[in-house]
Image (cartoon, rainbow, N blue to C red):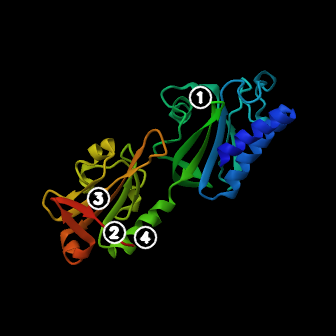
Amino acid sequence: MLAQSVLFLKYNAEENYTNSAELRGSITELLRRSVNEFANIHGAFVVFEPDALDGEDGNYADAAYVGANATGRFSPYWYRGDSGEAEQRIISEAKIGDKASNAWYTCSLNGRESCVQDPVFSTDNGQKVLLSSITIPLIVKGKAVGVMGIDVKLDSLQSVINTVDENLFNASGKVSLVSQNGTVVAWDQASDRVGSTVMPGDGLPATLTDWLRQGTQVVGWSQDQSWLTALTIRLNWVRQPGVWLFNYRLKKCWWKQRPWIMRFKNSEMNLLLFS
C-alpha cells in the first residue's frame, strides 16, 4: 500500500506539473507518518535510482529537508528514535552502493520482486528490538526505478509463538520460528535467545539448516522416535530469502492420546491441526 502511494504521488506530480520540492516533501511526510502511526513499524525508506523520481537530483544536493543525499538523490529513511517520535536519516551513496551489505536495495531493484531481509537488532524508542526489512520495488512502465522498504518489529511474534503452543498443543510442545540464516526470531523455550543464531546444543533438529535451504515441508519423528517435528514457512510472495522455519516439536505420548489428529496413508504421515 505504501509503495503504491509513493508511485501515485510521483504520477500525480507529473500529471499536474507539481513542484519537485513539493513531491519530495509529500513522500517524506508519508514515511514520517507511517512510522509515527504504526507501532509495529520501526522505520520506512524510499530510494530512487539517480534522477528517477523527478529528474531534478542536481537541484537538491545535500537537501535533507526534502530527503536528498549529497548527490541530490532521493533517499530518506525515517525511524523511531529514542524519543518515540520519527526521526529522519539520509541514506548516503556509499551505503546504497556498498555491494557487501546493500541487499536491502538491490534484491528488490534487480529482481523486481518483494524481498524479506534477515533479522537484525536495532534500537526503537530506547529499547533493543529485532527487526526484519520488507522491501518492494517501485516499478514504472515495467522498469524498477527505486525501492520502498519498511523495518518491521518482530517482538510480537514471541507472544504469537506462546499462543500457538497453548492453543494447539496445551503448552505441551516446543515451538520456535527461525529465519533463513538461522536467527532465532521467537522461541517459547528461551525468549532470551531471540536474535541469536541456532546452536547444536539447542535441541532443535540437526537437519534444520538443510530444511531451511531446501524450503520443503517436513513432518517426521526424531531419531529416537520420541518427538514429532513439523515445519516450514515458504514466503512465496518474496524473492529471497524465501523461507523461514516454523518448528514445533511434540512428544510421541501426546499424539498417542489424540489419535484423531493424525492419519497415515501409504506410509506417509499427514498432520492435521485444529485450533
**Residue 110, numbered circle:** none
**Residue 273, numbered circle:** 2
The residue furthest top is: 58
Of circles 4 and 3, the one toward us is 3
Q: Quadrant of residue 168?
A: bottom left
Q: Residue at x 53, y 37 (%)?
A: 113
Q: Amino acid at mark 2?
A: Leu
Residue 249, x across and y down, in percent: 27, 63
Crowd class of label 1 (few under 14; some 14 to 19; many from 20; radius 10 Å): some
User: Considering only vertical position in the picture, is 248 above or below 124?
Assistant: below
User: Which mark is first along the chain, 3 or 1?
Assistant: 1
Q: Which residue is mark 3?
A: 230
Element type at marker 3? strand
The residue furthest front is: 266
**Residue 96, numbered circle:** 1
Disc 4 to disc 3, C-alpha distance: 17 Å
The answer to whether marks 1 and 3 mark residues whose Cβ atoms lie closer than 8 Å is no
Q: Which residue is mark 4?
A: 163
Visible residue check, residue 60: yes
User: Which mark is first along the chain, 1 or 4?
Assistant: 1
Residue 9, x across and y down, in percent: 76, 40
Residue closest to the eye, 52 or 87: 52
Crowd class of label 3 (few under 14; some 14 to 19; many from 20; radius 10 Å): some
Q: Amino acid at mark 1?
A: Ile
Of circles 2 and 1, the one toward us is 2
Of circles 1 and 3, the one toward us is 3
User: Which mark is first along the chain, 1 or 2?
Assistant: 1
Q: Residue at x 22, y 49 (%)?
A: 206
Disc 2 to disc 4, C-alpha distance: 14 Å
Residue closest to the eye, 24 or 10: 10
User: Which mark is first along the chain, 3 or 2?
Assistant: 3
